Amino acid sequence: MSIRSVGSQSMIDELKFVVLKRPQDSHRDQATVDSQWQGLHYLHQPEYERVCREFDAFLALVQASGAEIGFLPGQPATGLDSIYTHDPLVVSNRGVILCSMGKTARQEEPDAFAAYLQQTGVPIVGRIEPPGTLEGGDVCWLDERTVAVGQGYRTNAAGLRQLTALLGDDVDEVIPVPLPHWTGPDDCLHLLSFISPVDYRTAVVYSRMMPVPFRQLLLERGWRLVEAPDEEYDSFACNVLALTPGDCVMIEGNPITQARLEAAGVRVRTFPGQHLCIAGGGGPTCLTRPIVRGSVKDSL
């Protein structure tokens, strides 16, 4: 297909075109899963057939939104983690920025994605170069002109500087957000691990992990924070995909967070993700790389 416009400086506006990757092209089969999951520091061994069924349930929800879906093809150099298509790119109004992955096992993913983008006509405006590292899961658009970027084991200061330069006049403000050590460099901790915008100035968060200055900044700017409880953090209650403002997808099994979102006026759709998401440390946002979203209707 040919993309006439690119625009995803938003986490919540209507999803128009999004790229996913099927398990058949990332996980391939149970033998591949068995050979990789421990080296990738997965929480438990995924069952390939369950990964496929869970992906189909998630895919049906995205399809029902009306968004056009592109599928990233398989590449021999990429592995199980490549199903999390959000991380190898950052999307701006002028095109995409290829990331430099902080996780060594994922270093080939940006180039694999670039080959697909060239076929679809999506412009590439630049890339993060070593020693800079940056992953898409550390980038959170607060509005079209304001972006927060987590700094931790996956994104470093050099990567943040390069991203700021590449975004240029597309943004007014880049907000660095230092991330905690948490469980160490082998596990996945992104900025989007503890915040997901779901509506204008509304986000589901896990405040116990939020840096105080960042949390205070959001509150000062009028954000409503929907709190995920301790018992639902590990089941990815904070990693939520907005299909449109106030309409989101989350992993099932988080009833407290779901009820709090619904009480805040947010529609919630759920799917099973024990083997697709929780095992590998990536929720529904991680499974999707929005390339085109609807125009921003509001800004801070």
Image (tube, rainbow, N blue to C red):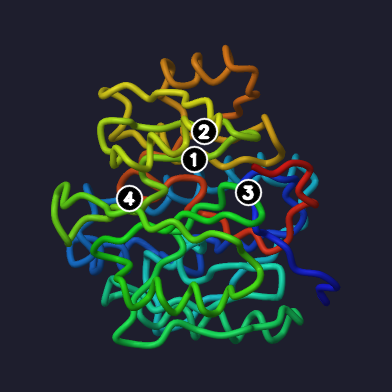
Q: Nearer the viewer, mark 1 or mark 4?
A: 1
Q: Which label sits on residue 196?
A: 1
Q: Amino acid at mark 1?
A: Ser
Nearest to N terminus: mark 4 or mark 3: 3
Res 281 label = 4
**Residue position marked by numbered label 2 in the rendering:** 203
Q: Residue at x 51, y 39 (%)?
A: 240
Q: Mark 3 = which residue?
A: 143
Q: Position of residue 23 (x, y in %)?
A: 49, 60
Mark 3–mark 2 CB contact (< 8 Å): no
CA distance for labels 3 and 2 = 12 Å
Look at 38% across and 64% down and name the residue there: 81
Question: How far, Cα to Cα, is label 4 from label 3?
Answer: 26 Å
Three-letter amino acid code at the position of disc 3: Asp
Image x and y of residue 70, in percent = 69, 65
Q: Quadrant location of residue 146? A: bottom right
Q: Nearer the viewer, mark 3 or mark 1?
A: 3
Whether residue 9 is visible to the viewer of this picture, yes or no, is yes
User: Where is the N terminus found, in terms of image quarters?
Assistant: bottom right
Give me the C-alpha separation between circle 1 and circle 2.
Answer: 5 Å
Label 3 vs 2, first from the N-terminus: 3
State if disc 4 and disc 1 touch (CB < 8 Å): no
